[in-house]
Image (cartoon, rainbow, N blue to C red):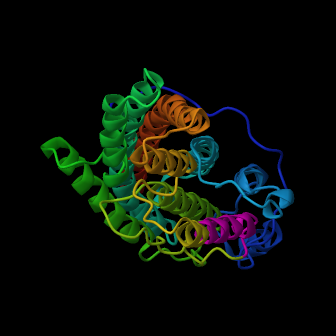
Amino acid sequence: MRATAGDSSGAPPATTSKPFRGFSALSLRRHQVASLEPSSDGELHLLDLLHSRLAGSLQSLLPPPSAADSKQPSLILSLPFLHKLLDALLACESDFKSLLLLVLSRNPSLILRPPLDRAITDLLDRSVKTLDLCNAVSLALQSLHLWNGHAEIAVSALYRQCPPSAPRQISRARRALSKLLSTSAGLSTSSSSCCRMCRFCSAKRHLQTVTSGLTAPRCGDSASAVLLALAVHTITALLHFSLWVMVASFQCGSGELLPPPRPPSVSRNMPWAAALDRLHEHIVEEMKRERKEGGYVVFAGMLAETVALGRSGREVLEMAKNGDVTETAIMNLAIASQKLEEGLEPAERKMREVFHRLLICREEVLRCLSNGGNSSAT
């Protein structure tokens, strides 16, 4: 993926932080009594900012209470939702990097001390898999352009009916809609499409390894090292959830769409943990409801725009089989197709920005690791 410069904009107001396994600002200060390298007020402030901004961002992603009372609640997983979630990830990355540079500016060798040493090593390993997943999601977004093309062909054919029941145009629309509903988000049987499908299926398996061994940091001989390890844990947990959402939004091959593994449960006392858990539960419930009410396999994943397009396409196809397609049904199909197409380009740009920023962040961590080794050797 070609990296493009960018930065996240805006962040929700800070919320009050809760302690994480006893590691509140007060407990960190108590830990400093036996610490050779106490953490500063600036470090504590940046950690609290990281946690509170993330809590606010995740809270803003939750649907309003009134949505639960709706007879036909809209799906939470949509392209605008993914855009906001990735903005939260970029803001978290920025806060994490600020804290990293501040802590290591005082003592570069701190990155080699427990519990930070293991946390950094795990983060570097997971970041490689994360970048691969970013590429896979970008390929999935590109495939949606191809998939949506079938709907555009059907709409074009039906709008050109003259007379309204022209069998040739209806037959053309039926062929296009049959392809729309029988392929998985544009991942057809062509060699390039098969490559994309394999890439995304492989990326889904990476999701298991991203969260494998994700544990809360333990005490160390430095409060600053513990503090930074908590920040590493936070961004790693958010990375996992973001990737979990991406995998839930798209489908890999045919067959029933199964819920991805639950996000790690090692962060229960973090200030952002409750919102994260509620988002996960809401998404899983949507998966169950869509399969139960829809009565069909969601080939293109749980993305709201693709679900709506599939539903409209199925409705028009049934009408076309009877040789009588209403203008309302054609209009609904056209609107669903246009909405998907308009959301794809911003989503692709955001994914490129995320890839670029995570790559730079990984390089920054590697540089800090190298500086820490040089500092301890002198």
In reply to whether residue 280 is colored magenta, the answer given is: yes
Task: Decide if residue 109 is on the left or right side of residue 166.
Answer: right
Which SS type dominates the magenta stretch?
Answer: helix
How far across and how far down the image is residue 165, in percent? 43, 31
Task: Decide if residue 73 is on the left or right side of residue 202.
Answer: right
Q: Which residues are magenta?
A: 269-286
Q: Quadrant of the N terminus?
A: top left
- Write the residue at 58% across / 32% down: 327
How far across and how far down the image is residue 114, in percent? 50, 71
- Write the residue at 57% across / 65% down: 290
Whether residue 284 can be seen here: yes
How far across and how far down the image is residue 71, in percent? 78, 61
In reply to whether residue 149 is colored magenta, the answer given is: no
Vertically, is 10 above or below 370?
above
Near-viewer residue (304 or 103): 304
How far across and how far down the image is residue 284, in percent? 59, 70
Near-viewer residue (377 or 319): 319
Near-viewer residue (124 or 335): 335
Whether residue 139 can be seen here: no
- Write the residue at 39% across / 40% down: 144
Vertically, is 361 above or below 239?
above
